[in-house]
Image (spheres, rainbow, N blue to C red):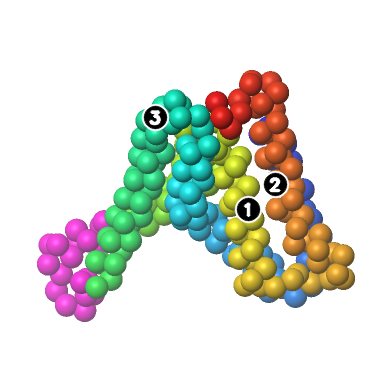
Amino acid sequence: MDRVQLARTILGAAATIALILAYNVNPDRWEDAAYGGAAQLLVAPFVLIIAAPLVIVGFIYYAPPHLRPHLRSRLRTPLKAVGWYVLALIVIGGVLALTAMTVNADDGKDWWEYVLAVASLVVIVWGFPFFFMASLYSARSAFNSAQVHPMLPPVLTLTLVWVFAAFSLIGDGMPPGPPLVQLCSTLGGPLTVTAVSLWELRRMRTRFGVTLRT
């Protein structure tokens, strides 16, 4: 599954580059594509925090009554992952905001201003890379939701990719090119992710006997 997902990502990136080269040579297009990918990576955990509870509640509700307490008892791991992620974001944002509001480079610095400056440096050097890697891991693992049910990560991936597709269509409109190319560019990514996720669900069911109600 990892190899298939990696191949799909590489082919998707190659298709995006080919479309930009073929139908829009504007250099700004490359910058927009880079910013769009980075924005999706950073926004993905927040979309998961909003959407995942609805999906998880649906899973628990759909499960047989005798399994629901067992699934609820497994929520501790993803909730802990969400808590640490939100706490890290609050600490990073709080330190930078407090430093920007209180430290004045023009006056004589008090000891606490030096402490805040050092804390801000730590956040920049360590906090930003940590936040980036945490966002990447959270988006990939869906906050360790597999601890609740093995089928949750692919289902949450399906939800996430179609939410981003809708946001992209509403915000940026159709991509450049002929109508057929526009359709393939708009739906190619979500449909291929959907196909891979459905294949993963099928492998769980056929090879390991995992179903939505087990």
**Circle 3 is placed at which residue position?**
69
Circle 1 Cα neighbour tier, 10 Å, few/some/many (<14 / 14–19 / ≥20):
some
Q: Residue at x 58, y 52 (%)?
A: 160
Q: Residue at x 46, y 33 (%)?
A: 148
- The residue located at (64%, 63%) in the rendering is 166
The image quarter containing residue 210 is top right
- Amino acid type, callout 2: Val
Query: Which residue occupies the foreground of this view, 201 or 69?
Result: 69
Residue 116 painted magenta: yes
Pick whichever of labels 2 and 1 is earlier in the sequence: 1
Mark 2 highlights which residue? 193
Q: Which residue is mark 1?
A: 161
Q: Quadrant of the C terminus?
A: top right
Q: Which residues are magenta?
A: 102-120
Decide if residue 170 is in sight here: yes
In primary-sequence order, the first of circles 3 and 1 is: 3
Give the SS element for disc 1.
helix
* Distance in Å between CA atoms under marks 2 and 1: 7 Å
